[in-house]
Image (spheres, rainbow, N blue to C red):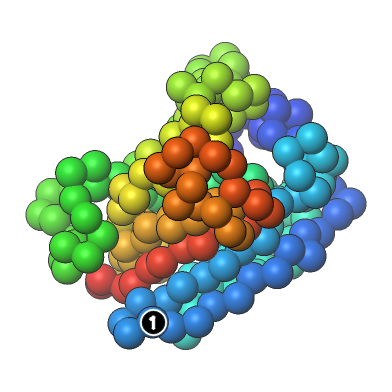
Amino acid sequence: MPCIDALILDLSLHDDKISDGEVTTTTEGEDFVTVVDASAGGYNQAANNPWTYIKFSESGATRVDLDDEAALESMDWDMGLRRFILRLNGGSSGPSCVGAAALLESEYEAVTEVPEGIRFAPDDYYTDSCEIINDSSGLPNSPQVTMGAWWSYSACVKTTGVPHLIQLADGHIIKVRVETYYATGQEDCDARDQPGEDSGVITLRWRYLL
């Protein structure tokens, strides 16, 4: 991995804490629905708390109990979540080869197969001199992660509905849509810029395609 020292500082990674954020997975038809408590103590306390790591499998998604610095050497997780940032285990974020592609012009329900010629990109948010590349939100230390298209920000964190394809380290491919960032009130945020309640509780709808 490049820029490990910068990553530890920029994203406030810990070596003495493991997230106890709850991760639950249920099924709805052919989809899995995974709810991840990535609240990390709230926006102002997030830097003082660890990331929540999950792994996708054909039986659902589960939490992987790692501290942040151990995760930098682990192939056992696929996605790390803290507040609105979703990292994948590859590139700038981890030692594995998990990558994603945003399907900006598609609806989740319409994605039934992997488009021909699609390219999966790992997280890549450092320059050659290890300066962080931030996204367009204007929020500090918000890196330009591959899955950044799931949200936008004005007065609150809105979900865009953009589906992503994620290629896991074993070659399987899943489609994913982030459905909520707030435990309640996401629709009010999306429609009227009114923040919901219990932010950082992320709902993922996903399914294996390959």
Q: Is residue 95 left or right of residue 41?
A: left
Q: Residue at x 31, y 82 (%)?
A: 30
Residue 90 percent across, percent down from the top left: 49, 47
Tell me the amino acid under the disc marked 1: Glu
User: Residue 103 vs residue 122: left or right?
Assistant: left
Q: Label 1 crowding class (10 Å Cα cut-off): few <14, some 14-19, many 20+?
A: few
Q: Residue at x 36, y 44 (%)?
A: 160
Q: In what quadrant of the picture does the C terminus appear? A: bottom left
Residue drawn at 34 percent across, 50 percent down: 161
Which is nearer the eye, 74 or 195? 195
Asked which quadrant contains residue 184, the reply is: bottom right
Q: Residue at x 64, y 26 (%)?
A: 141
Does 145 sit above or below residue 33?
A: above
* Location of mark 1 (residue): 28
At mark 1, the secondary structure is strand
Is residue 5 visible in the rendered structure shown here?
A: no
Residue 70 placement: quadrant:
bottom right
User: Where residue 129 appears, x then y in whole percent?
Assistant: 57, 14
- The answer to whether 182 appears left or right of 122 in the picture is right
Tell me, yes or no, if residue 135 can be seen here.
Answer: yes
